Image (spheres, grey):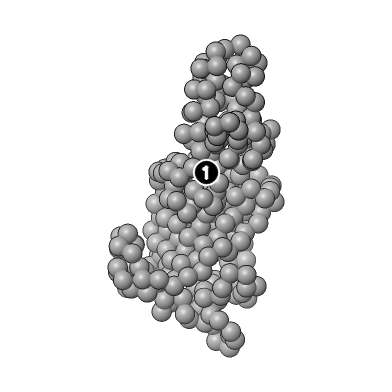
Amino acid sequence: MNSNAIAAEIRKGIAAGQYRYGARLPSVRDLAERYEVSQQTVAAAYAVLAALGMVRTERGSGTVVTAGKAADAHLGTFTPPDLAAATPWKPANGGQASEETTLVRQLAAPKHMEPWGIAEGSQVVERTRIRSVDGTPAQHKLTVIPYEIAARAPEGHEGAPPMLAPVGSAPVRPPEGVRVADWLGWDVARTEASITAEPMDPAASAALGMAEGTPGFRIVNVTRDSSGGTVYVTVTTAPLHHRVTLDIIG
């Protein structure tokens, strides 16, 4: 058995939950004896898994699993004919979903937001959420909204506008069957989506417990109004061993 075959076996075990997030894997020596291969072959297998962000090898501490059970997470249903039938984010394989807002802040837009249609230096609000499956972080979601749009509140609403609610606030949701955009009076005409596999940024890497620069899925949605202006942007990052799905209904 070569290093790639060993890495594939361990990867299957991680995806199936046999090796849980945070668990310590067998030592190089023990695994070499199990597979009857050299320690160099096992070390190479662990290096492959580390490059995928699934394990982290610490000198003197061994190799630790840094990826959760395969989440098969569903991003949602877009433009459904019946809003009541829309499915929000959830684990598609029946795991327990949870979601937490970890950051809300106002800042001057950096230059890297210009391709999204957000001018450098303009005021924006960033909201970060961590989505977990069975308690293990599975997705890092960043939402960027121009401040003047984020500051809008539905008629009769009291307190901070929903998009400016600080971390720890109780979630404020629209009435059943009403889109958030309609509830907040946003002009939403279309969404442009791109999905790439590339190194995770530092914030996503830290939130998902992976080494900085680990490759992952990056899903960028830019939602625009009827004049082409940017209403909001979402950037969702997920480990490569997950499957990310969505429904788009015309």
Q: Residue furthest bottom?
A: 156
**Toward which corner of the image does residue 147 lie, by quadrant?**
bottom left
Which residue is nearer to you in this view: 122 or 40? Answer: 40
Q: Residue at x 55, y 42 (%)?
A: 242
Query: Mark 1 = which residue?
Result: 210
Position in image of residue 154 (x %, y %): 54, 82
Residue 146: in sight, yes or no?
no
Q: Is residue 214 left or right of residue 138?
A: left
Q: Residue at x 48, y 60 (%)?
A: 142
Q: Is residue 236 left or right of residue 170?
A: left
Residue 102: in sight, yes or no?
yes
Which residue is nearer to you in this view: 27 or 160? Answer: 27
Q: Residue furthest top?
A: 36
Q: Residue at x 51, y 57 (%)?
A: 141
Position in image of residue 89 (x %, y %): 59, 56
Q: Is residue 84 left or right of residue 187?
A: right
Position in image of residue 108 (x %, y %): 36, 71
**Toward which corner of the image does residue 120 lie, by quadrant?**
bottom left
Label 1 packing within 10 angstroms: few (<14), some (14-19), many (20+): many
Q: Which quadrant of the figure contains the N terminus?
A: top right
Q: Residue furthest front?
A: 60
Which residue is nearer to you in this view: 26 or 179? Answer: 26
Looking at the picture, which amino acid does disc 1 mark? Met
Q: Residue at x 48, y 81 (%)?
A: 152
